[in-house]
């Protein structure tokens, strides 16, 4: 009996220590464990759904980028044929063409310092490839090629030919030209 009595005292002391440490009784602990488990399960499902949604969005973005690129290239081809036709009419020959050029562009990181921000090239990140348009022209009466080699009037007529070529491919509701050169 004395051994049992000592064990009962130990059990009571342990219960008291558990209550003091604010763990509460076993029912509360089990209830809290179940709630935590349910919350974790719910969050795991949410994370899984978010990962699936992210993958789907990436696929949609990729498809849209491909479609936009195709439509852009088709539009450039249509504009090129009209641009060349109008350029030949305006200058009595020669040729004009829009070229899509790809240029790498370094990404920059900005480090904020107490004094002033510093910009440096990032070697860790890949370069962005930016596309642009370049106008290639050749007049029938000159050996000079390139837009920069034309006179101001010739550049103005070239830009007008380009504007009208764009408007023939994708007609706007109206056009107002003021000081076109």
Image (spheres, grey):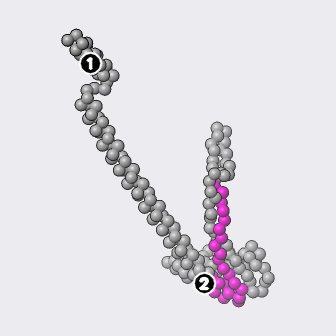
> Mark 1 or mark 2: which is in front?
1
Residue 82's disc is 2
- Determine the secondary structure under disc 1: helix
Q: Residues within 10 Å of mark 2 (few under 14, many from 20)?
A: many
Q: Which of 4 and 70 is in front in this view?
A: 4
Q: In this view, does 52 lie to the left or right of 101?
A: left
User: Which of the labelled discs sits on residue 11, or is there none?
Assistant: 1
Marks 1/2: CA distance? Answer: 95 Å
Residues under numbered marks 1 and 2 in contact, where contact means CB atoms less than 8 Å apart: no
Q: What stretch is highlighted in magenta?
A: 82-107
The residue at the point 36 percent across, 50 percent down is 46
Tell which of 176 and 23 is nearer to you: 23
Can see residue 139? Answer: yes
In the rendered image, residue 33, in percent from the top left (x then y), is placed at 30, 36
Residue in view at x 22 percent, y 10 percent: 2
- Residue 161 picture quarter: bottom right
């Amino acid at each position: 009996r004395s051994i049992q009595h000592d064990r009962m005292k130990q059990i009571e002391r342990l219960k008291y220590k558990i209550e003091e440490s604010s763990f509460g009784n076993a029912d509360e602990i089990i209830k809290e464990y179940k709630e935590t488990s349910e919350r974790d399960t719910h969050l795991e499902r949410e994370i899984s759904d978010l990962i699936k949604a992210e993958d789907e969005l990436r696929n949609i973005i990729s498809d849209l980028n491909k479609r936009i690129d195709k439509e852009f290239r088709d539009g450039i081809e249509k504009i090129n044929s009209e641009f060349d036709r109008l350029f030949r009419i305006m200058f009595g020959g020669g040729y004009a063409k829009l070229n899509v050029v790809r240029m790498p562009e370094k990404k920059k990181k900005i480090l904020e310092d107490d004094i002033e921000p510093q910009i440096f090239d990032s070697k860790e990140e890949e370069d962005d490839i930016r596309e642009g348009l370049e106008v290639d022209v050749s007049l029938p009466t000159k050996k000079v090629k390139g837009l920069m080699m034309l006179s101001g009037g010739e550049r103005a007529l070239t830009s007008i030919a380009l504007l009208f070529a764009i408007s023939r491919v994708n007609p706007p509701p109206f056009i107002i030209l003021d000081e076109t050169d």
